[in-house]
Image (cartoon, rainbow, N blue to C red):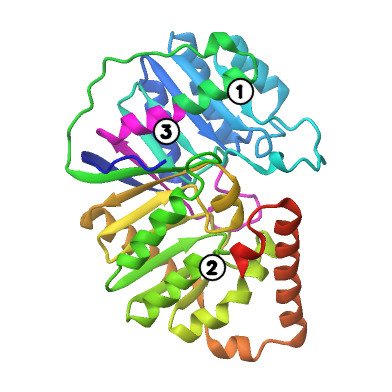
Amino acid sequence: MKFALKRHNQVTLLRNGAEYFPALLTQIKAAQIEIHLESYIFRADEVGQAVASALIQAAQRGVRVSVLLDGFGSYDFPETLKQALLVAGVRLLFFRPEVKRFSLNRARLRRMHRKLACFDGKVAFVGGINILSDFDGDGLPPRYDYAVQCIGPVVNDIRATLTREWRHSAWSQLKHGWTQRLHLNTPPSYIDDVLSQLVVRDNTRNRNAIERAYLQQIRAAKSEIIIANAYFLPGYRMRQALLQAAQRGVNVVLLLQDERDHALLQYASWAFYRPLLKAGVEIFQYRAGFMHAKVAIFDAEWATVGSSNIDPFSLLLAREANLFIHDPVFARQLRSDVQQHLQEDARGVLPQHLQQASLGLRALVWLCFGVVRLLMGLSGYGGKKYLE
């Protein structure tokens, strides 16, 4: 779903969990009426415990707290923590709970990958940050990611999205008492004049909404496109749009994760490097640690921050949400932060790197690409049409 572009919003960039979690906890503690929270992963580490404790305290003081977690991403959510939340009055549901871990039912691939939150209909968060610590205990820098805090009319769209998914999940799991609507008399505050638009992807009428929004910005770009995305395996239309942008003189820069995470997908994406580099696209691999960012900046005027990767899982299967923002101040701020990571934490991929690659590496790339195509074909999603 692509909501209308809304004026009079305030949008604050949050870098990594170090900025996101304090802001999230502040809003949980300040909420008086309602909290909605969606997350793909909710880990019971120090961050998850702090969030859970704040949610419990909110429910105990009478706030209606609704938490929707993905049944696969949060499959290992501790039963003891689940019971503590429920006993305190937190309404906790799992989207498509994993009953059979190795089921061949392709519907189980349709996950809830969004990271959204809304408080009293006044403040909301959109981004790619799950409820888990930025640190993996292996000595690497914190996980690289973004979110935004929103105030203004766009919050109504975020709350409507959260409410719709919550009610659908509650009905499907026979929690009919949890489906009642709560009407809030909280007119939005008009603090700034940032233009913002929530774009949601689902498996009904909005299957291609986020991809179309990206394509619109790529095709309209006149000078620069910067995309920082952890999992990059674009379909034919997006690849062609990026190639055409570079060929008409747009500076196209891609910051991608290296092969340390989800190696199958990362190596498969290398199959597209040669034509992109030949067209003039600059490709960088993030080397400092784990990258989880899903952002883009267009002409230093438009930007997007959200949960959607540019890969088959996000663009063809999962429920996703991205905020598209038309504001030069915000776009330049995000651009500056991405540029800093490009300069300090990334390595450029040059044409000679591909030419000098060993036969073993080339074989691995095409093997991974073939496996991805095979899996897409077996699942019935995308297949040749997506990757041709």
Kind of residue indicated by mark 3: Leu
Quadrant the N terminus occupies: top left
Q: Answer whether labels 3 and 2 touch (C-beta < 8 Å).
A: no
Vertically, is 202 above or below 78? below
For the residue pair 365 and 165, the one nearer the viewer reads as 165
Indicate the quadrant containing the C terminus: top left, top right, bottom left or bottom right: bottom right
Residue at mark 1 to residue at mark 3: CA–CA distance = 20 Å
Give percent across and percent down for residue 206.
47, 43
User: Looking at the rendering, which quadrant does residue 92 occupy?
Assistant: top right
Q: Residue at x 36, y 15 (%)?
A: 32
Rendered image: mark on residue 236: 2
- Apparent side of residue 268 relative to residue 131 in the rendered image (left or right): right
User: What span is colored magenta in the figure?
Assistant: 133-162
Instruction: Examine the structure image and report whether residue 383 is included in the region drawn in magenta.
Output: no
Q: CA distance from mark 1 to mark 2?
A: 36 Å
Task: Report if residue 53 is visible in the image.
Answer: no
Q: Residue at position x 34%, y 49% from top? A: 324
Q: Classify mark 3: residues with Cα within 10 Å, few (<14), some (14-19) or many (20+).
A: many
Mark on residue 24?
3
